[in-house]
């Protein structure tokens, strides 16, 4: 666990002058922020404002164009080679990434494996757990997400439970940082509240650092320690939820919140 | 039909060679298809170029000429004569493997990007991602076009008569027709039926595999894959 070898007071996540472009389109520019260990941060803002890109950069699904990112005190974008900093290779990324989990909007469960397979694949192959250890852990996590009896089900048979399994799968890797990318956006309306409650429970019983992109303002409000409002690839407001939701300091935050509430 | 028993028994004497060439050719095709198909997706440019040269070179030249070249020209160059049936299997495999490589490449690329990202988020290595997540899903898509390819390969075994492999076409042409010239129509009709039956056996095996593979990924065979098999798209 890098939180153990992280000197106290050091941030868990650091974005330092990060820029990301897709062609001529600048998605993130000069982005600087830090997240403390165990902190819960929600990213809100209009579509296309760059929120999801931040999670994808942390998962190394995208590469930074400028600036650097570090997680748990280790650089994610660069590595040391012969005393010089060079862009990180796949192996280095995997090493740092091991401590980061991600839950996707569309679950991304593997359809060629049962629930058990989905839950034990990475713990056995990446963390080197035995099948028995990994299965025991999988059972605990399935119990936690309320699907204890679905170990041998197929992901497609889990009407509504897929995102819960995806959450359990991410937790099986014992992440220090968990990235949640609009995890309730693809769910049927009656399932949303249950998944959000599960996330609140996990948030309050673990010391995992959370970074969530969400359109659920109620969740952002009571789950997070801090909310960052994005617009046009920049953080335009970064405040505690009580402050941001009741007296937004920026007119665009105000307009955005108004629009979301009226929906 | 007069002499039917004779026709059937003489043609059947060619069956072992036809079957060996077909099965050997299919095995080599599968190996080369996966090897070259994955090489076409390699991050290394050199590997991709080598695979591309193989695919275009073998797909773009005549099978008969390839066979003549390996059987008649190669011995002159290297002083080593391949046994006819092996030369045949080699050409069938090399040629159909070139088509198969594109099937493998296309199927791997058709697996949604989200699956790769799910695997990355679990820190699986590139090899683990391919072997454990991508290929098992891609194989389902590969089976219908491979069914087409294997049937084509079966029919191509007739070319081996050019290098004096005693398969069923050669039995008809060299043994039966000279003796029963007036019945050439019936002889070749029987030959057609034999190829048809073998092709149906291949299809039955592949359909079973497709059902099994699809069940493993929790779905019925995709509509697109079935249409491809029906129209012959995806082979050439």
Image: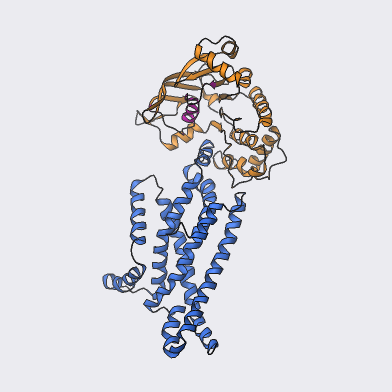
Chain colours: A orange, B blue
Where does residue A166 sit, x and y in percent of width and height? 61, 36
Q: Relative to B156, does residue B233 appear above or below in the rendering?
A: above
Q: Relative to A253, does residue B96 appear above or below in the rendering?
A: below
Name the residue nearer the viewer: B88 or A132. B88
Name the residue nearer the viewer: B138 or A250. A250
Q: Relative to A73, does residue B119 appear above or below in the rendering?
A: below
Q: Is residue A59 magenta?
A: yes
Q: Count how many numbered circles sit on residues in the image.
A: 0
Q: Residue furthest right?
A: A149
**Would you say residue B118 is visible in this rendering?**
yes
Where does residue B106 sit, x and y in percent of width and height? 45, 51
Quarter where residue A158 is shown: top right
Quarter where residue A147 is shown: top right
Where does residue B38 sit, x and y in percent of width and height? 43, 51
Left or right, residue B14 beside residue B81: right
Name the residue nearer the viewer: A128 or A93. A93
Left or right, residue A160 beside residue B136: right
Q: Quadrant of the N terminus of chain A?
A: top right
Where does residue A201 sit, x and y in percent of width and height? 67, 25
Magenta residues, as a range? A43-65
The residue sitting at 47% across, 19% down in the picture is: A231
Name the residue nearer the viewer: A75 or A116. A116
Q: Quadrant of the C terminus of chain A?
A: top right
Q: Is residue B148 magenta?
A: no
The residue sitting at 27% across, 73% down in the picture is: B76
Q: Residue furthest left?
A: B77
**Would you say residue A39 is visible in this rendering?**
no
Left or right, residue A154 beside residue B188: right
């Amino acid at each position: 666990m890098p939180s153990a070898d992280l000197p106290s007071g050091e941030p868990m996540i650091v974005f330092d002058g990060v820029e990301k472009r897709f062609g001529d389109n600048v998605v993130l520019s000069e982005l600087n922020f830090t997240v403390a260990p165990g902190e819960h941060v929600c990213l809100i803002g209009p579509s296309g404002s760059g929120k999801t890109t931040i999670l994808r950069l942390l998962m190394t699904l995208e590469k930074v164009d400028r600036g650097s990112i570090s997680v748990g005190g280790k650089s994610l974008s660069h590595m040391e080679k012969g005393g010089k900093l060079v862009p990180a290779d796949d192996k280095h990324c995997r090493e740092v990434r091991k401590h980061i989990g991600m839950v996707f909007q569309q679950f991304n469960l593997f359809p060629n494996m049962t629930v058990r397979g989905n839950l034990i694949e990475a713990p056995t192959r990446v963390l080197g757990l035995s099948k028995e250890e990994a299965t025991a852990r999988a059972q605990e996590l399935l119990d936690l997400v309320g699907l204890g009896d679905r170990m041998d089900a197929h992901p497609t048979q889990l009407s509504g439970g897929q995102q819960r399994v995806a959450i359990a799968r991410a937790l099986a890797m014992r992440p220090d940082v968990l990235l949640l990318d609009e995890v309730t956006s693809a769910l049927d309306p009656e399932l949303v509240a249950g998944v959000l409650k599960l996330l609140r429970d996990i948030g309050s019983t673990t010391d995992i650092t959370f970074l969530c992109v969400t359109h659920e303002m109620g969740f952002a409000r009571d789950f997070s320690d801090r909310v960052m409002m994005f617009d046009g690839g920049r953080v335009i407001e970064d405040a505690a939820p009580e402050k941001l939701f009741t007296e937004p300091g920026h007119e665009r935050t105000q307009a955005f919140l108004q629009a979301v509430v009226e929906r | 039909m007069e002499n039917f028993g004779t026709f059937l028994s003489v043609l059947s004497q060619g069956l072992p060679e036809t079957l060996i060439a077909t099965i050997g050719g299919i095995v080599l095709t599968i190996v080369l298809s996966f090897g070259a198909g994955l090489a076409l997706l390699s991050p290394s440019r050199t590997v991709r170029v080598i695979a591309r040269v193989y695919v275009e070179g073998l797909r773009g030249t005549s099978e008969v000429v390839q066979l003549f070249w390996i059987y008649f020209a190669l011995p002159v160059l290297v002083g080593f004569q391949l046994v006819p049936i092996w030369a045949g299997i080699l050409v069938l495999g090399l040629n159909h493997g070139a088509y198969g490589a594109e099937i493998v490449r296309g199927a791997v690329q058709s697996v949604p990007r989200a699956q790769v990202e799910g695997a990355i988020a679990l820190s699986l290595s590139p090899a683990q991602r391919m072997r454990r997540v991508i290929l098992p899903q891609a194989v389902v898509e590969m089976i219908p076009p491979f069914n087409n390819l294997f049937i084509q390969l079966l029919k191509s075994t007739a070319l081996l008569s050019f290098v004096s492999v005693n398969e069923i076409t050669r039995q008809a042409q060299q043994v039966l027709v000279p003796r029963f010239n007036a019945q050439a129509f019936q002889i070749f009709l029987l030959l057609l039926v034999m190829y048809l039956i073998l092709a149906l056996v291949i299809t039955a095996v592949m359909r079973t595999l497709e059902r099994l593979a699809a069940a493993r990924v929790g779905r019925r065979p995709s509509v697109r894959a079935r249409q491809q098999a029906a129209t012959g798209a995806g082979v050439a």
